Image (spheres, rainbow, N blue to C red):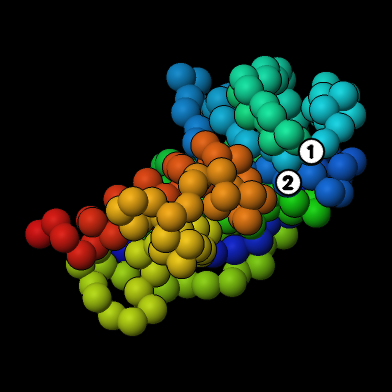
Amino acid sequence: MSLHVAFEASSPSLVLAPTLETLPSLEVDLERQYALDPARPIAFCVVRCRDRDRLERALAADPTVARFDRIAGLDGHHRYRLQRSETDVVGAYRQWVAAGGELLECRGADGRWDVEMRFPDRASFGQYHDFLVDEGVSVTLHRLAETDAHSRRAGDPTLTDRQREALSLAHERGFFEVPREAELAELAAQLEISNQAVSERLRRGQARLVDAHVVD
């Protein structure tokens, strides 16, 4: 059994919060994080912003960001590698790792983060939730659901909402047909994300379905 959690988090001390506040139309998908130094994790993000110069001015002025590098970009979709600053930032990464959490989806927009995570149990999520509240983070819970990897119950949250959306659209448009009736770019345009982001969303969703319903 594990606990699937969806919640909204907002605080000026969360990483990228000042940039999200400065650019209300900005959307950020956190794809993955890793940390050689747990106090300063490195994040890979897809950022949707038409004005790259304004975006990078905001990032340069953001006290929660120590450095940023643009890796790729096209038509307002940019991929960045970011490292958070050492001070005055909520150390969320270290805490959720310590609690056994797994980040499933994380999107920043309108000055807040919408997050989906998996924790071993309610106690471990409670530990992380209490940490966020103690750090002054406003947390609004949207969903708490216990699930096991092999459950076939209707509504079992094996997939994140965004993975389900991408897989449903791909099926509807004939992406999985042979020959293929839709291309990745068409799905990306419909979802308003990059080709790479929709590809990763489909792969992760398929992997979760296999784990839940195929692998014994």
Which of the two residues, 121 or 109, is positioned nearer the viewer here?
109
Circle 1 or circle 2, nearest the eye = 1
Quadrant of the frame with the N terminus: bottom left
Whether residue 22 sits left or right of residue 174 in the image: it is right
Q: Which residue is mark 1?
A: 49
Whether residue 179 sits left or right of residue 211 in the image: it is right
* 3 versus 134 height, above or below: below
Q: Residue at x 63, y 56 (%)?
A: 190
Q: Secondary structure at mark 2?
A: strand
For badge 1, the amino acid type reads Cys
| Residue 78 % position (x, y) | 68, 30
Q: Identify the residue at the far left of this view.
A: 216
| Residue 28 % position (x, y) | 68, 43
Q: Residue at x 33, y 51 (%)?
A: 179
Q: Identify the residue at the far bottom of this view.
A: 154
Q: Residue at x 58, y 55 (%)?
A: 115
Is the Cβ of the residue at disc 1 closer than 8 Å to that at disc 2?
yes
Whether residue 84 sits left or right of residue 121 in the image: it is right
Q: Secondary structure at mark 1?
A: loop
Distance from disc 1 to disc 2, alpha carbons, whole Å, reads 7 Å
Quadrant of the frame with the C terminus: bottom left
For badge 2, the amino acid type reads Glu
| Residue 215 % position (x, y) | 14, 56
* 51 versus 178 height, above or below: above
Q: Which residue is mark 2?
A: 27
| Residue 164 % position (x, y) | 45, 64
Q: Quadrant of residue 212?
A: bottom left
